[in-house]
Amino acid sequence: MSKVEFPRILGHRGTLEKFTENGIKAFEYSLANGITGFETDFHITADGVVVVMHDYDIKRTTTGEGVIETMTLAELKSFKLKNSDETVPTADELFELFDHRRDFYFELELKARYGEYYDESRMDEYINKLHASAVAHLSRGTYVFTCFDTRVLKRVKQLHPEAKVGLILGGLTQALLDAAIDAQCYSIAPTFAGTEQALVDAAKAAGLKVNLWHSETLELWKKARDMGADVSTNNHPVAVLKALREAGLA
């Protein structure tokens, strides 16, 4: 077998190995070492540019501080990622790495929530711009818009009915499975903790793809496989892929 088929390893924020998360170098490192899928996060700047970052505040992963939604792109780019000469990438800068590859899978997490920084108009701008960037650079069918909030997912479907959406959750419950189905989800992403096999089976029977996270070791990847996961998010994707190869599983 030349590559991992199921569950496909998704590099979480590119990787947390060797490079600062969500920087271009983190994605390039994983790509160069055989990773063919990612799960990552997006915000929008005050001047309307979608950027790649997990936290609202940039303090944890950059040399600056402040909330992305209150900063212009120029202000954001004036800081470096920690332990790096890189700046926070835009969605376009990241997606240009993939150039409509068909052998790829991307989970695009919308970090926005309705509230202080996102009224209805701002949310629509954010969704539309992330969608436009994905369409411009990624192959159709290779990406899913994900979120913890079904209200956001439902809005994605209202604005872009063809878009695939996925619900991120903790442990899978029947109520959350029902919520995912109600939101017309393509996928769900539950944690290992609190997720029972019977509900994974029910999700699969309902036609949902399953991302069990995080599979940080070979043993956890095997558990995800045995439970029927289609993909599994991983903070150390290259190390786990190396272990799979050494075990003859990739």
Image (spheres, grey):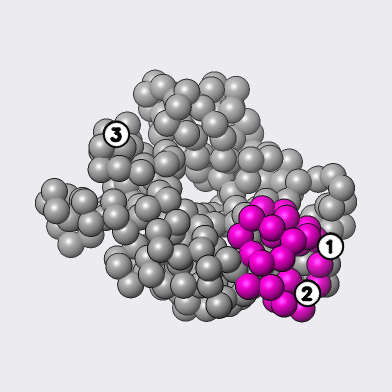
Q: Residues within 10 Å of mark 3 (few under 14, many from 20)?
A: some
Q: Percent x, y for residue 146?
A: 59, 49
The span picked out in magenta is 55-80
Residue, disc 2: 75
Q: Percent x, y for residue 64?
A: 71, 65
Q: Amino acid at mark 2?
A: Glu
At x 63% / y 40%, what residue is drawn? 148
At x 25% / y 37%, what residue is drawn? 219
Question: Cα distance, mark 2 to mark 1?
Answer: 10 Å
Q: Is residue 48 left or right of residue 199?
A: right
Q: Amino acid at mark 1?
A: Thr
Which disc is residue 223 wearing? 3
Q: Percent x, y for residue 223?
A: 29, 34
Main secondary-structure element of the magenta-colored stretch: loop
Q: Is residue 67 magenta?
A: yes
Mark earlier in primary sequence (3, 1): 1
Q: Quadrant of the N terminus?
A: bottom left
Residue, disc 1: 70
Q: Residues within 10 Å of mark 1 (few under 14, many from 20)?
A: some
Question: Cα distance, mark 2 to mark 3?
Answer: 44 Å
Residue 136 shows in the view: no
At x 51% / y 27%, what residue is drawn? 171
Q: Quadrant of the C terminus?
A: bottom left
Q: Is residue 221 above or below residue 35?
A: above
